[in-house]
Image (cartoon, rainbow, N blue to C red):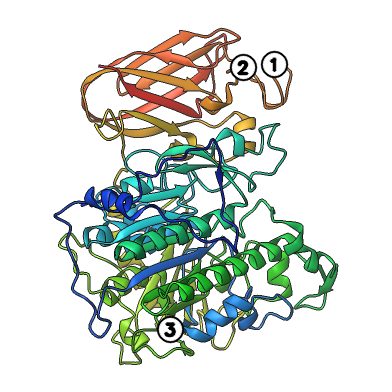
């Protein structure tokens, strides 16, 4: 399924920190000999897609996904004062899908984008609680493109699993510069990026520690700049050796925390308050808008790079966002006529920008496409445009948008689309159905957004045929999707490709535990579904804090003191794997609890708990490291 081809992974960091390239610097390349050596590492058996008719060569692909940018947060979409000149330029050069929908939350959108499969069916329906991971048997776009002979790179946010085999380098990406879980910081992020690390001082976007092909590595610069710089370096190397590339560039801006250099937010901070949609005074969300301005600047740098290197014409560029606007204030200032924001099932929670540009093709730019489309459509569209026909294609719920891009008839104008997310996959739990301009939310409230774009009036009683049709569609869809939803997503231990695996609380099934406050609170409990691939003796270490923090099991977040915030009276540790249950006492200065159980190959569950002196469970161990010893 995953290509054995590796390009660029041989790069070695010669300095302790890695400097991010400035805008006016040249993009350094390795010697041609070194590049050829790297190329020889690629599999001789990779599949090659036929060139797309009329292009003369395989097109390159770049997918940019902004984090939490709303549909209205673009100048070209009518915003009254937000400046986005480079997004506006891309808008003018692209086909724009004006009724394009994602999930109202991060991971589900990303899983659908990469697979073309509904979130309920691929397993990734939430941001944590074991529900960010797409089932391992479902290939991703990175797999398909790698198998077709493309160089594949991820630069930015992943949020689809942090343990083998769910990491991006396990899913077809040959070059990865990323971070764990939802952001910088998060519970799974390197301790130096964590908001509860007293040495960090809330500056996790500057000089972060990032994962480079699975190895935590210090970088120098602002996170968004790093993503774009690394992506451009990779593209330049691919161009030099004549290899087509598939680049996934999901920025972590404009997600919280609100961190961006003052020069980008100051113009908006200086505005103070403005009149909102309802005539009320709204404080301008300066840091949020500043982050969008920063994305816009980097988009401009990328476009300049593509033009200077001659890559622009034959590069398919997709620009979108993962959900509606995070900032409630932003939606109160301008929301393109919609109501709602991130996490909500009304239109503003999941209708987002989608621009597709391919200059060399016969796709005419500067056009709006109003048909109902969705993020699941991107995967089949890109495979179609690039002439890739995988032999291991997993059935997709999305459909190709190629006819719409070319201005041709499309057979899906009357399609129905279900949206469902969060860890609870029950009937009508966080679910909606879209059909044309109809929206059915929760199985009860029906809206016609053509007549009522802010979705204030429930018209279910006036339209019983539509109401019943969409309910029946959802019930049939959910009956099938819930079967897929129930399938486990196993983390593997003792695999030859990952003999040491860290399990993070954000990927357990149980209590919500995804960030610094959850970590300090110290109450969540959960268990991981695991597959033991190799029978043998394992070393299993339990920790309350990230292993690299050097913090003790009993201490809080501020110092090595049991009186600091978040301190817990940990006196024992418990490890349960399947039917095996072991408990050991811990000392006040212990940083981990270490077990060495013999484990039999097979599927089971792993639970790790921290206990008090009386043996009562305080919380789960938020971090577990499992290593095959012999």
Q: Is 418 placed left or right of 255 in the picture?
A: left
- Assess whether mark 1 and mark 3 are in contact (beta carbons under 8 angstroms): no
The residue drawn where x is 37% and y is 24% is 626
Q: Regarding mark 3 in the picture, which secondary structure is present there?
A: loop
How far apart in space, not on screen, are marks 3 and 1 (Cα)? 59 Å
Q: Which residue is mark 3?
A: 436
**Mark 2 surroundings within 10 Å by alpha-carbon count, few (fewer than 14), some (14 through 19), many (20 or more):** many
Which one is in front, 33 or 131? 33
Which one is in front, 255 or 455? 255
x and y percent of residue 630 in the render? 25, 16
Camera sees residue 209: yes
How far apart in space, not on screen, are marks 1 and 2 (Cα)? 6 Å
Camera sees residue 117: no
- Assess whether mark 2 and mark 1 are in contact (beta carbons under 8 angstroms): yes
Which one is in front, 519 or 381? 381
The label on residue 464 is none
x and y percent of residue 194 in the render? 62, 37
Q: Regarding mark 2 in the picture, which secondary structure is present there?
A: loop
Q: Which residue is mark 1?
A: 562
Q: Is 141 placed left or right of 183 in the picture?
A: left
- Give the mark, 1 or 2, whose residue is nearer the N terminus: 2
**Mark 1 surroundings within 10 Å by alpha-carbon count, few (fewer than 14), some (14 through 19), many (20 or more):** some
Q: Which residue is mark 2?
A: 554
- Give the mark, 3 or 1, whose residue is nearer the N terminus: 3
How far apart in space, not on screen, are marks 2 and 3 (Cα)? 56 Å
Q: Nearer the viewer, mark 2 or mark 3?
A: 2
x and y percent of residue 70 in the render? 60, 70
């Amino acid at each position: 399924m995953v290509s054995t081809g590796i390009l660029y992974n041989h790069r070695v960091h010669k300095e302790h920190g890695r400097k991010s390239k400035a805008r006016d610097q040249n993009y350094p390349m390795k010697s041609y000999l070194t590049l050829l050596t790297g190329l020889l590492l690629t599999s001789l058996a990779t599949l090659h897609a036929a060139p797309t008719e009329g292009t003369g060569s395989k097109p390159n692909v770049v997918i940019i996904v902004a984090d939490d940018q709303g549909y209205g947060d673009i100048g070209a979409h009518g915003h009254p004062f937000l400046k986005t000149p480079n997004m506006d330029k891309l808008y003018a050069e692209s086909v724009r899908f004006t009724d394009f929908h994602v999930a109202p939350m991060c991971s589900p959108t990303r899983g659908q984008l990469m697979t073309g499969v509904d979130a309920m069916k691929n397993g990734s329906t939430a941001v944590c609680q074991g529900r960010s991971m797409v089932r391992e048997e479902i290939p991703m776009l990175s797999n398909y493109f790698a198998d077709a002979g493309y160089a594949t790179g991820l630069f930015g946010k992943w949020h689809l699993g942090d343990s083998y085999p769910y990491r991006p380098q396990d899913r077809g990406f040959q070059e990865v510069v990323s971070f764990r879980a939802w952001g910088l910081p998060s519970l799974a992020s390197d301790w130096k990026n964590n908001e509860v690390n007293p040495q960090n001082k809330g500056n996790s976007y500057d000089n972060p520690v990032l994962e480079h092909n699975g190895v935590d590595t210090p970088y120098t610069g602002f996170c968004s700049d790093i993503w774009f710089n690394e992506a451009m370096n990779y593209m330049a190397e691919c161009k030099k050796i004549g290899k087509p590339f598939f680049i996934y560039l999901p920025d972590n801006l404009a997600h919280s925390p609100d961190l961006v250099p003052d020069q980008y937010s100051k113009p908006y901070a200086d505005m103070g308050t403005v009149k909102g949609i309802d005539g009320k005074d709204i404080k301008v969300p300066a840091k949020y808008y500043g982050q969008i301005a920063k994305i816009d600047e980097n988009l401009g740098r990328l476009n300049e790079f593509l033009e200077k290197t001659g890559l622009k014409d034959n590069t398919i560029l997709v620009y979108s966002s993962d959900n509606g606007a995070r900032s409630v204030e932003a939606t109160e200032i301008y929301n393109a006529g919609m109501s709602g924001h991130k996490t909500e099932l009304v239109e503003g929670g999941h209708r987002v920008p989608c621009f597709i540009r391919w200059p060399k093709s016969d796709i005419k730019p500067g056009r709006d496409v109003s048909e109902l489309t969705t993020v699941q459509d991107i995967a089949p569209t890109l495979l179609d445009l690039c002439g890739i026909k995988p032999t291991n294609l997993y059935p997709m719920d999305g459909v190709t948008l190629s006819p719409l891009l070319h201005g041709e008839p499309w057979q899906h104008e009357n399609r129905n689309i279900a949206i469902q997310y969060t860890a609870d996959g029950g009937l009508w739990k966080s679910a909606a159905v879209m059909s044309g301009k109809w929206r059915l939310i929760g199985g009860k409230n029906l809206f016609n957004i053509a007549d009522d774009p802010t979705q204030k009036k429930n018209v279910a009683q006036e339209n019983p045929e539509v109401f019943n049709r969409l309910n029946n569609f959802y019930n049939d869809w959910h009956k099938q999707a819930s079967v897929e939803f129930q399938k486990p997503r196993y983390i593997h231990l003792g695999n030859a490709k990952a003999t040491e695996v860290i399990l993070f609380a954000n990927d357990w099934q149980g209590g919500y535990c995804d960030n610094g406050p959850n970590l300090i609170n110290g109450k969540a409990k959960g268990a991981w579904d695991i597959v033991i691939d190799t029978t043998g003796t394992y070393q299993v270490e339990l920790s309350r804090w990230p292993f690299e923090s050097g913090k003790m099991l009993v201490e809080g977040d501020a110092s090595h003191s049991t009186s600091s915030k978040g301190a817990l009276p940990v006196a024992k540790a418990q490890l349960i794997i399947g039917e095996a249950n072991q408990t050991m006492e811990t000392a006040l200065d212990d940083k981990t609890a270490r077990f060495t159980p013999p484990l039999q190959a097979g599927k089971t569950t792993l639970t790790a708990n921290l206990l008090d002196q009386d043996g009562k469970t305080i919380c789960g161990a938020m971090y577990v490291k499992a290593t095959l010893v012999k």
